[in-house]
Amino acid sequence: MAGEEVIIQKNPLAAAASTRMAGDERRLQILRVAVTLFSQQGFRGTTTKEIAQAAGVSEAMVFRHFATKKDLYDAILDHKACSGGPIDPEQMVAEALARKDDHAVFEGLALGALKHHDLDPEFQRLLLHSALEQHELAQMFFETFVRRVYEFLGGYLRTRQRDGAIIKVDPAIVVRAFIGMVMHQSLNNNLWDPQRRLLNISNELAAKQFTDILLNGISVKPKDKESRKATPGANVNGKKGNK
Amino acid sequence: MAGEEVIIQKNPLAAAASTRMAGDERRLQILRVAVTLFSQQGFRGTTTKEIAQAAGVSEAMVFRHFATKKDLYDAILDHKACSGGPIDPEQMVAEALARKDDHAVFEGLALGALKHHDLDPEFQRLLLHSALEQHELAQMFFETFVRRVYEFLGGYLRTRQRDGAIIKVDPAIVVRAFIGMVMHQSLNNNLWDPQRRLLNISNELAAKQFTDILLNGISVKPKDKESRKATPGANVNGKKGNK
DNA sequence: CGGTGGTAAGTAAGTACTCACTTGCAGATA
DNA sequence: TATCTGCAAGTGAGTACTTACTTACCACCG
């Protein structure tokens, strides 16, 4: 916290020395550099000087492209929320939805989210930072995207309850439970335990197991020994030797 | 982000004007004030001046009690991790553990965690901030406390598997799933959705439902209609009109 | 008196942001 | 083809202010 220096030299995002770029190019480059820094250090923790250095330009250039630091931050959250953010949940599992294949629906959604957070871990960190810093756009993202997931999944659960396929529980609680498993897994993987010391499993296995737990629970049912299909037997794996 | 002023006047934590306190008293008071500010704004987002003002003393007093800002931060995390933090999981559900009452074990743990985060929401925020800021003590807390929960719950699950009461799954995955539900619920309540717009249920209900989901799942089992005890029937509640 | 609780007024190093100025490059002109 | 020119890309050295941290000093009380 006192004397550590962030090493920026030879940053792949930095421009090759002394190149002159088109305005839009540079703008995007600064934005990308800033995404990385903000996601690592938050808004207040990142200086405009750092951003400029990492982008390989003078600080003045940052302010040519973004009037204020906050403008830059807003542009980033906008950018992220529009391009990377909203994987459309309904579309992602449309066919499973039509078949009313509960396992495929939940597994598909979980896998989508896990993969997304894996490919773009900056996004989750950025969102966390902005939520802690009470940035308006974090709440906006939550209000729009997360609400949509709740409504979509909640709606699906309600129809399955009408079908008699699912017990009577408040769907919102079920959704919270499931999203909790998935988000917590991502959060562990890229914040709490990035070395995966407590649990190291593939996204595929995580999605499958979480879905199984949600739909089937973990207790052995008294009059239900061989009637299910996939779960038992070769299911004990994952923790060790999983690459 | 530019011109907002944090209103601190008449802060209940501030000393009555111009009182002379004993050294230890003042130290503790500064520490408590700092906890609140750090948990709201993080390390870099909180100034020593702010802390001093909120405590009702001059900035120099802060530095008399804590040599550097980081010392203060460390002292806080130490304080929190030692006093408020480690609710001992094993002790909390000892009797349920002895009775091998799975529902009571999981429900007890969940309720303990939910209540704790409810009473001391600063702690979760503080931990998140320090994890994002890569503070060493966040990782230390995780390594010690969280690992203990995994080992404890994982161990319990393994004995229950040997009893034949629980299906064969990697216990660590089950633990992650369950902790995920609980932590996500807390995180929603005091970070993402403090107004509880998406879901507003009591800690008791949340603990019970999460436990039910984990142990029993949500699918209707083919040959298992009236054999279970508590779950069905009056179980649809919570979302609305829950105070 | 000495020690403890307290402060006002510093300082040096940041901080976001600006400004007067230079550089490189595409295209019109000779 | 060579040169001039207009303008966007880019900069170094600022400004006004804030930051963590210090120093020198005061007031009370046993």
Image (spheres, coloured by chain):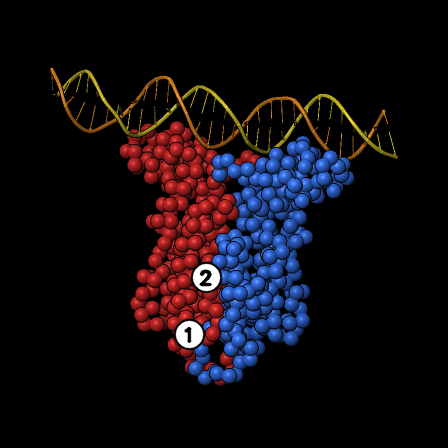
Chain colours: A red, B blue, C orange, D yellow
Element on which disc 2 rests? helix
| Residue B200 % position (x, y) | 52, 62
| Residue B123 % position (x, y) | 60, 51
* Towards the viewer: B97 or A64: A64
- Give above or below for A37 relative to B177: above
Q: Looking at the picture, do discs 1 and 2 lie on one chain?
A: yes
Residue at 51 percent across and 77 percent down: it is B232
The N terminus of chain A lies in quadrant: top right
Quadrant in the rendering for residue A228: bottom left
Which one is earlier in the sequence, the residue at label 1 or at label 2? 1
Looking at numbered disc 2 in the image, what kind of residue is underneath it? Ile
Quadrant in the rendering for residue A99: bottom left
Q: Which residue is mark 2?
A: A179
* Towards the viewer: A89 or B138: A89
- Give above or below for A42 relative to C20: below
- Give above or below for A8 relative to A167: above
Q: Which residue is mark 1?
A: A161
Residue at 67 percent across and 39 percent down: it is B55
